[in-house]
Amino acid sequence: MSGAFQSSRSPLLTTYALLVYAFLYFPIAVLVVYSFNGSGVGGFPPSAWTLDWYRQLFADSALWDAVLTSAIVAAVAVGISLGLGLPAALALDRAQFPGKALFRRLVLLPLILPGIITGLSLQMLFVGVGMKLSLFTVILGHGTALISVATTEIFAGLQKMDRAQEEASLDLGANHWKTFWRITFPNLQVSLIAAALLIFTLSLDEIAVTFFLFGRDNTLPLEIWSRLRRGITPEINAISTLILLFSIGTILFWYRLRTRAQATGEVQAATALLPSTLEGESS
Amino acid sequence: MYSRAYKAGVTIPPLLWVTLFLLVPYAILFCYSFWSVSSLQVVLHNWNLQNYAQLFRNPLYLTVLLRSIRIAGAVTLLALLLGYPLAYYLSFHAAKRKDLLYQLVIIPLWASYLVRGYAWKTILGSDGVLNGFLQYLHITHRPVEFFLYSPFAVILTLTHIYTPFTFLPIYASLEHVPRNLVEASHDLGASPFSTFLHVILPLSLPGILAGATFAFVLTLGDFLAPLLVGGPSGIMISNIVVSLFGAAYNWPLGAAISFCMLLLVVTLLFVTERLEKRFTIS
């Protein structure tokens, strides 16, 4: 680190950075403030502070049904994406096979591909084989799209793992199965928990893929979406505030886990999103 | 060190799954794009290129496609203008507060898309916060209607949503810039601006490319923000796809448009990856 460079002050750049933060947080702040506003969603200044919208929200059973639906979808999606993302990460890290580059690209594509394409091509598959759209198809969609997140998270964990422990275990006569459960799995535990948290949050918020795959039951984002079309009330601000609080909590927890799991967690977290980084590290 | 059985065991299940649920659906999409719909709304498997021809001949689709590309371009540019200086500030000037400031960027990155889109709707609406504020200050005397339901609203909302996505790879590439090169440039008498232009900027090009790709592709595929804040003048190409899969019921044409988007995404990723390799020092 260059001491001279680090300490060089740049008030202009600092101001600019502050303005960008203001831009990023301004809508969030407005949303939260107006969830306590007695006189509706808009208008200025907000007046008549109230908790009525939260009271209304807690009595709204349709909304809580949607919360439950979303929680179920997210929990099963976590299972699917970890169950397939873990072997996919191991395969990318350790196996050589024809078509590996294609496999890597395919697994990671949903990270960058707009949800609409994944959603409607899955819809075509399900309808084509005569499946009725339901919660089950939503779960398959979330699980499939989020394998990409599981794979990047777990792959990053594998890169930091000390391979010698596994080697020693195998040399000392333990088979692959035993080595996996005694050595590999415990080493990856923090990565797995971090991945699960992130996938759960992303699934809870997912709307583009869900839009094409849902049947009768609304997930929480779809329920909010259908209410937005009927007109907006501060009750939506209230549920949005709760969703934000939940996301912020899990994101910060995820970040802490990730930083602890990896020495250079900060940059790792930043680069894991890039498909090309995965290639660079694996070659 | 790992046996054949182990390698097969970890490779085959995910390989089968992504083949069935990603590769096969994309292939179905591809096939559909060459079929057509009869007047009775039955899909006919008569292979032809009409859908693709229609996409480029029908002025409605072409107008919306060009508008979508313009909007995506604007969002990309704005996200870079906001994201790059922020990433630069964090990487080179934030010192001890770096970790905290980084967390402050990833919170909006992962926080709910719908919630953030909704927030802009409440700000820009004719009874919204912005109009309320302007009237409170007596700058305007009646609600300004064009804030919401315009391409401007779509650009603003999507810039807000995708700036953190753009920031992330740029920040990662700036963190990888060898600090001794920066120091050497200073020691040899280059001004901070010259150092930035000749050392830091070229080395962060991979990040800029990746960030720009994120913003462009995700904006082009977005159909929710136009519905939420765009109105009729903010309709984008993905909204046409949604309507073709819904009320308009023309899956083959919708598939053709989607396949073009898929092709564009894959091409952009390929080009970005190539350029990244060229610009990355090993």
Image (cartoon, coloured by chain):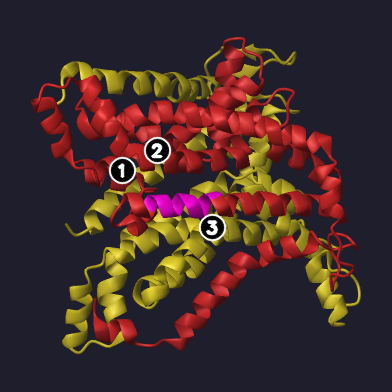
Chain colours: A red, B yellow
Residue found at x 44% / y 53%:
A255
Point out residue B245 in the picture as x, y percentages from the top left corner. 67, 28
As drawn, which residue projects farthest toward the top?
A130
Point out residue A97 in the picture as x, y percentages from the top left corner. 21, 24
Part of the protein shown in magenta:
A250-258
Q: Is residue B230 visible?
A: no
Three-letter code for the amino acid on which mark 2 is drawn: Leu
Three-letter code for the amino acid on which mark 3 is drawn: Ile
Is disc 2 in contact with disc 1, using a CB cutoff of under 8 Å?
yes
Residue found at x 59% / y 65%:
A24
- Could you give the CA–CA distance between mark 3 and mark 1, rounded to whole angstroms? 22 Å
The numbered mark, 2 or 1, whose residue comes first in the sequence reads 1
Q: Is residue B223 visible?
A: yes
User: Does the stretch in magenta take in B34?
Assistant: no
In the displayed structure image, the side of residue B188 where residue A64 appears, left or right = right
Q: Which residue is mark 2?
A: A192
Point out residue A165 in the picture as x, y percentages from the top left corner. 16, 36
Is disc 3 in contact with disc 1, using a CB cutoff of under 8 Å?
no
Locate residue A211: give its quadrant: top right
- Could you give the CA–CA distance between mark 2 and mark 3, rounded to whole angstroms? 20 Å
Three-letter code for the amino acid on which mark 1 is drawn: Gly
